């Protein structure tokens, strides 16, 4: 249970922090300006930052060590080594993760392709993803059913000769509105008669395949998340792809979704904590500068209570995420299952608290586009729903606790 | 302390409820469609609904009885009579309040004009407002200072011969982005040497006056609130208006802002409770229809806990607002000061809880545009900041409590 | 929905308030001293206070109007009239309720006897209770089962010739440790084959009957509640009483328990609010007198936040209890069922918050016997369990809400 | 930041856990019985357990390594090594800490004596304390002032020839009611003119010195904590002791109190987490065994929510305490100051939540003496006040955060 950053992490963290502080955060206003006119595409400054990140060696840091060992992909870091780096990217969550080619859902998709992809699949999709040339989408959640119960999934992936034919409707397919998004990993049912957790498979669907119809985008609070390609509702209407597009074995869909889960959870949670730290910084700067009722707002007891509680809660949550990363590295997703569920519940709640109090400390500015706070809140709130609502994760934890005696 | 609706209120409530349920709520999808292309203007369906509301006698219900007695304006209801009607409009808060010509900030502005306006001011601005022909803006909050402390206001209103010359920068001037918005009531300092609460005055500024520059709009979470004319940042740069545009006496600005406060607080709070009731209805419908882990979501204990807590909290909050309305009617704003502060703190908090749990019950749909929930949350959250943050109102309450012994 | 106190209530409230403030609260130290040595009996000062209360006409105020109409018992007040009086007694909850002969469980037992007792039962038990000469116990909860589900009750009341024979074990039989406690109303199963809500009956058991064995007392947090006769575990071991001791019809036990419920809930909740008000008063006095870090504690923002929140929450909760009282008076327990459940959940939570913050404001003194605060907390906490835990009441509310659409 | 238990800790933890589970917890009923009649003295079973603990090598484990290095005292563990052991003793907090001679306030007093005591002081007081033969008291808090602000302390320690004369009134002098308690460390002012943090000194006062008057005991909620010698109010009325009784240098009182703070905080917090774990265990056992409304309580969603939240919160809090222990070991109290303050706020709050939900899950049993839960709650609640209220610690944290930018 040694969470201290080793020398490599320390070095990378310093470099990444410098990059984020001196290049990324100062680019936020330009990014916001460009976003006014970039539609669903990425603002142009991102490509500049990507080039620079790559030249600084800050690229694909997220990909766990085993991928480096097998294929030479990524920086070869453990989850525990990468975690503090993910936090740093969370300080500017709209820009930094993509600038260092470590943004969801591409990260999880790259992991799946690296772990389970055939040589051809990796060449066709993984390599351009690792190069930051294209983007991808993960198409799992369905509007018609409670997807937190995986056995509810209704999209059909039917074998037909040398092809699979996909029929279903997905939403929250994040990124798919972007013109740079080229391929979807779609989860669907290949064998409705099998054991509930062996029914599903994942399949690669190029977005220009006939029958793929992007219906519309959904927003998060008022945010379209357009700079990341939004969140699409996609109708896969008799979409036909070659059988070799299947990812992994038939019936392995649920297992793949579990494999994708652990590291992604670490990334999300550490980025949230980076957001929370950014919110604290903004609050501190604000309350030191602002005067009300004759004294700096920083001297008001209630504001100090918010700041202290923010610090207390962030510290606790971060340690739990680091422990989870360490567990994933040492005993795997399965051995870390309680903790993977626990951080999913704990970290968005902490982030919401911290960001909400930062909003309050900023007054009207806090809910507006003049700070990143309201958008951070929306992201944290979404994460209490995405990948299963809190209630499902609490049920997992409780059942394990009940079984343990 | 009789809060029961009398026969007139009961009758009006039934009529208003019928209008909202059969005409307004069914218009929500059309309104949303039109809003895609209406820019900062009001979607066209609003004019149809206004015409119908007026023909049904559901018009200007908000204006307290005294205005009817003095000028024949409005429906002549007390605050207590109007309160349940305001709640009903809150069930569709983007449409219903405007459809019955009872939406902020026009309501408060109309009250000020009715109470303190000269004949000429009332003819020029109040009557078209009462007719729903134009809209208005209340320009008080400033980006550079903590406006919750009224003595911080920096905008200057300087006498110069027969004119006043206004210099300052305001934001959260809600509605001013709309092409239908014609006049601002601007709060500024007329006498910097006077007693702190006698320094300010309010003045009428037609928006087409030279020097009025609308810089940009601020959003609330991701929402521009474009259908209500957004929230503008306005630079009043050496804006010259005739001296007779002053509203009330010189130095009365603070007093006028207090007069405007009480009834507006009732309106806001009752609308929020209408939103909360709408959220409960949506939740109940959703959880009865949705199945997860083998049973309707409605049978899950945690969901029942949310629903019960929502009911418990709404009931308490509503009674406190009704009591406050009754106090304003019977002992005036000053006598109701603790309660006016208390509902400002209590009701947005309750609404946030109820709406947040409704979002959670809806999953991904809850944060999207497919329900009104996320937008309701943003409105409730804004109201913990607008008109002074919670902390200021709690200070008011605490000080009165401390003085009482 | 008129909650205002009428002239009679106003008059009685003033008299009761004077009695509590000038006689009861000043007797608290003496009461505490006497309690050191009074064992399970009532401290002697209580008898003096009872005599005085009676002479002042402050006696049996609790008993609802219908009892006065039927039998001439009590003061003939409605629940709404009595509610503010109950609150006043809550300001000194260990002394005042008993001083005015309106303390639980006697109040509920007297109601049952008045409503359902035979002439003989009323003469034997009700009249001495109304005179404050004896005390009584309500023996319902059982240690072996979850009594919140009434169908779980296991105690048997078996007919045997002209007698009933009772076999079972009860706890939380409050008051039974007192030497002044003479009779129990025992709930048990008379017909195990009947419909679940027609199985139970209530029966009168003099505590000196053979087979009644008081095993021990249970405490609440560390409090024995000795001055009120504690909380007894009672083994009814083949206890034989004449058949005419049955209260009401055979099989009416559940119905009687429901009848007992509504007014008792009002009493408990209003007393809790009286406790909360007392806690606020103590806090205000304390923080005005105490200096830390160079200024009175009253000027600290966090303390003002506590005081304001206390006021906000108390006001809301009180209005809901008053509405519930008014509903019971006008539409009966059944029509007020949601509200009766709602105040059970809401009021102890509010009281706990207020008292807990008062404790914090008092520092070490707050948890000690030097203020009534810690004991108030324990009482409020117990009421989240007694008469069914919060979770059961929330389920009742949620189900009604779910059925309503 | 390596928190993993090393082999020595793992070994000791297993031995201690076995001792607590097989000897201490099974002794709880006997301890409770003996406590009925042991007055302020320790129940006799404690001596048996102490003998056994000592024979098992589970003795004085608390004393940090440096004491072992300097004097050979204690087991020579670091704070990080001892922390998991402290948690285990928290599982039976009334018995286990004393059984292994690691209970407050003796632990802190022994540390002070070991670090700052003269040879004579150590021989006279430390050695019998280390042997578990006597107990001691720490007399710092005063009833008349807000002691959280150390500069408020009013007790005078006046030099008079070869003696010091002490005049003052202290409370929360825990343990002093016990006949086994022999000596107090008293904090008072030796030089009122000095710099605020150089005014105080600590001095050793044998409790049989003339002028030491134990006035009475204060309780915590209803608990007298008699088995640990209660909490005494002590009047030091012209108490004269030899000058060599001064502990450390004159004027070092504040510095000594800070030195005492860090490890004590770790002990308290880890014990609280042990209590929380015990509460979870009791809850799990209870809800699996109990049936309500047709299914085991363990299957109710709300109960699963409590259990999951308990697990989530405990895990986070424990990691923060371990990190704090590690910081104290590596960078000292001063370098760990934010964390030492943070755990003081975080851990009692978590423990309160967990224990409160355990109480709710137990129904009436939960507040009674039939489980340790209500007493655990009272202890956790007290710790939000003792050693400074939460608000003071939050202020410390906030100020450091504000200074850091």
Image: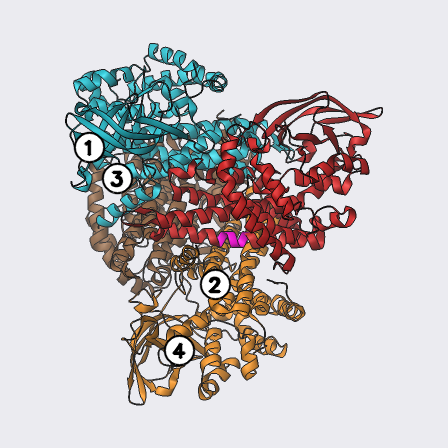
Chain colours: A orange, B brown, C cyan, D red
The Cα–Cα distance between marks 4 and 2, rounded to whole angstroms, is: 23 Å
Residue bearing the label numbered 2? A340
Q: Is residue B2 visible?
A: no
Side of D52 relative to A168 (left or right): right
Return the residue nearer the eye: A169 or D95: D95
Residue bearing the label numbered 1? C158
In the image, residue A391 above or below residue C310: below
Q: Residue at x 75, y 42 (%)?
A: D114
The Cα–Cα distance between marks 1 and 4, rounded to whole angstroms, is: 69 Å
Question: Residue C150's mark?
Answer: 3
What's the magenta region?
A: D312-317
**Foreground label between 1 and 2:** 1
Subunit of label 3: C
The Cα–Cα distance between marks 3 and 4, rounded to whole angstroms, is: 53 Å
Return the residue nearer the eye: B268 or C388: C388
Q: Which SS type dominates the magenta stretch?
A: helix
Return the residue nearer the eye: B87 or D133: D133
Q: Residue at x 28, y 26 (%)?
A: C108
Pointer 4 or 2: first along the chain: 4
**Foreground label between 2 and 3:** 3
Subunit of label 1: C
């Amino acid at each position: 249970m040694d969470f201290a950053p080793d020398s490599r992490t320390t070095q990378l963290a310093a470099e990444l922090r410098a990059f984020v502080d001196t290049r990324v955060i100062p680019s936020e206003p330009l990014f916001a300006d460009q976003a006014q006119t970039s539609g669903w595409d990425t603002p142009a400054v991102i490509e500049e930052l990507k080039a620079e990140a790559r030249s600084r060696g800050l690229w694909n840091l997220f990909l766990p060590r085993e991928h480096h060992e097998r294929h030479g992909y990524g920086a070869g870091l453990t989850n525990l080594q990468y975690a503090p780096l993910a936090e740093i990217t969370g300080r500017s969550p709209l820009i930094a993760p993509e600038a260092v080619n470590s943004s969801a859902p591409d990260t999880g998709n790259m992991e799946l392709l690296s772990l389970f992809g055939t040589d051809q699949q990796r060449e066709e999709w993984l390599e351009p993803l690792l190069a930051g040339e294209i983007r991808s989408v993960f198409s799992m959640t369905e509007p018609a059913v409670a997807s937190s119960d995986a056995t509810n999934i209704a999209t059909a992936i039917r074998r037909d000769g040398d092809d699979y034919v996909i029929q279903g409707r997905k939403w929250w397919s994040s990124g798919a509105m972007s013109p740079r998004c080229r391929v979807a990993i779609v989860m669907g049912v290949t064998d409705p008669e099998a054991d509930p957790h062996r029914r599903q498979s994942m399949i690669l669907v190029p977005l220009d395949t006939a029958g793929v119809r992007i219906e519309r985008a959904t927003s998060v609070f008022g945010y379209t998340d357009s700079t990341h390609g939004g969140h699409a509702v996609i109708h896969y209407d008799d979409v036909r792809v070659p059988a070799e597009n299947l990812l992994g074995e038939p019936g392995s869909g649920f297992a793949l979704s579990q494999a994708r889960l652990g590291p992604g959870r670490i990334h999300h949670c550490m980025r949230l904590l980076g957001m929370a730290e950014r919110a604290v910084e903004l609050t501190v700067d604000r309350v030191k500068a602002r005067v009300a009722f004759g004294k700096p707002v920083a001297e008001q007891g209630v504001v100090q209570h918010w700041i202290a509680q923010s610090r207390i809660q962030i510290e606790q949550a971060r340690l739990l995420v680091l422990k989870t990363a360490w567990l994933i590295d040492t005993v795997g997703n399965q051995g870390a299952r309680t903790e993977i569920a626990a951080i999913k519940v704990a970290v968005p709640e902490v982030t919401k608290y911290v960001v909400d109090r930062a909003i309050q400390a900023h007054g009207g500015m806090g809910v507006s586009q003049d700070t990143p706070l309201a958008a951070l809140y929306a992201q944290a709130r979404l994460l209490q729903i995405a990948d299963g609502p809190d209630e499902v994760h609490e049920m997992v934890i409780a059942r394990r606790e009940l079984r343990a005696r």
